[in-house]
Amino acid sequence: MPIKRIFILIILVIGLTSCFCEKCPGRKNLQPCGELIDSLQTQDVQIIQLGDTLRLILPVDKFFEPASVQVKRCKAKTLREIAELTICHCYALSNIRVSGYSDTVGTISDQKWRSLHQAQNIAAYLWGYGIPLNRMIVRGFGARGTIAGNATPSGEAANRRVEITLP
């Protein structure tokens, strides 16, 4: 292999392992994109990190207009930061799962429809900020995957969410 090709290959490998978001401290303290994660936690996003998997939980009541699948305009900055996080070198080559969940209000088909359209609207925002559609897997699960009981208003609210999972 000519030296020029080896040099180009080395440059490509370094480029793929560098951060694209300029805010990422790399793998320091095993906390990828620490500034973005800290910022998101102050903006109604619950973050759960298990190994290399990062789950961002967006409560529907905070991110969507009441009784709607439309994202609140005031959440555009938060969604832009989520898009920056998915471009970060730690997650730049992985697929993104955008999953919608609902409470048990309405019929099963209504629950699935609502959760799917909320997930699709979050994915549309991410796409608008430069995340390719072929990197996103978008699903609506309705009331499947509950994380709290639906017997109380707080339990129902916890179940109404959109989760973004990296990788």
Image (spheres, rainbow, N blue to C red):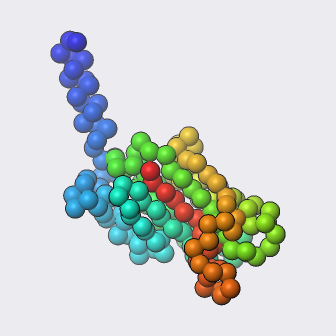
Left or right for 69, reference 58: right
**Residue 45 in the image: above or below residue 14:** below
Residue pictured at 36% horizontal, 55% vertical = 52
Q: Nearer the viewer, residue 12 or 27?
A: 27
Residue pictured at 57% horizontal, 43% vertical = 133
Res. 128 visible in picture: no
The x, y position of residue 45, in whole percent, is 47, 71
Left or right for 46, reference 88: right
The x, y position of residue 44, in whole percent, is 48, 75
The x, y position of residue 23, in whole percent, is 30, 57
The x, y position of residue 12, in whole percent, is 29, 30
User: Which quadrant of the structure image shows residue 54?
Assistant: bottom left
Q: Tell me the quarter of the image containing the N terminus.
A: top left
Left or right for 40, reference 107: left
Residue pictured at 26% horizontal, 25% vertical = 9
Left or right for 80, reference 13: right
Q: Nearer the viewer, residue 106 or 78?
A: 106
Q: Nearer the viewer, residue 159 or 135?
A: 159
**Residue 31 in the image: above or below residue 13:** below
